[in-house]
Image (tube, rainbow, N blue to C red):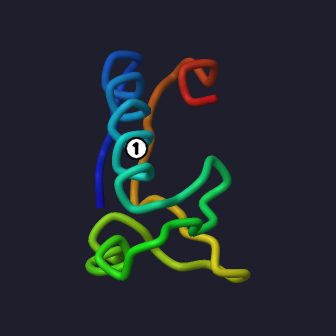
Amino acid sequence: VHLQTGQCGNQIGAAFWQTISGEHGLDGSGVYNGTSDLQLERMNVYFNEASGNKYVPRAVLVDLEPGTMD
């Protein structure tokens, strides 16, 4: 589980999740669109599989300003 705190932590975390999602073949909504079995390998390290073959990040986001987590 990843913990992101504050504006800086959440902005860096957003870039991290965008990169990791791309490496694992996930689109912006968390649906797998990749072409390689290698992308699915160890997917559970960063993501939990939800219903409809959708993957959600294993993360906790904390901030007093909700705008940084949109």
Q: Is residue 45 left or right of residue 29?
A: left
The residue sitting at 33% across, 38% down in the picture is 16
Q: Position of residue 25 (x, y in %)?
A: 47, 60
Instruction: Name the quadrant containing residue 55.
Output: bottom right
The single residue placed furthest to the front in the displayed view is 35
The residue sitting at 63% across, 65% down in the picture is 31
Q: Which amino acid does label 1 sit on?
A: Trp
Tell me: residue 25, above or below residue 52. above
User: Closest to the observer: 48 or 9?
Assistant: 48
Q: Where is residue 4 in the image (x, y as percent from the top left)?
A: 33, 37
Q: Is residue 32 left or right of residue 7?
A: right
Instruction: Name the quadrant containing residue 18.
Output: top left
The residue sitting at 46% across, 59% down in the picture is 57
Location of the C terminus by quadrant is: top right
Label 1 residue SS: helix
Q: Position of residue 61 (x, y in %)?
A: 44, 41
The residue to which callout 1 is attached is 17
Q: Position of residue 5 (x, y in %)?
A: 34, 31
Tell me: residue 13, above or below residue 43. above
User: Closest to the observer: 10 or 42?
Assistant: 42
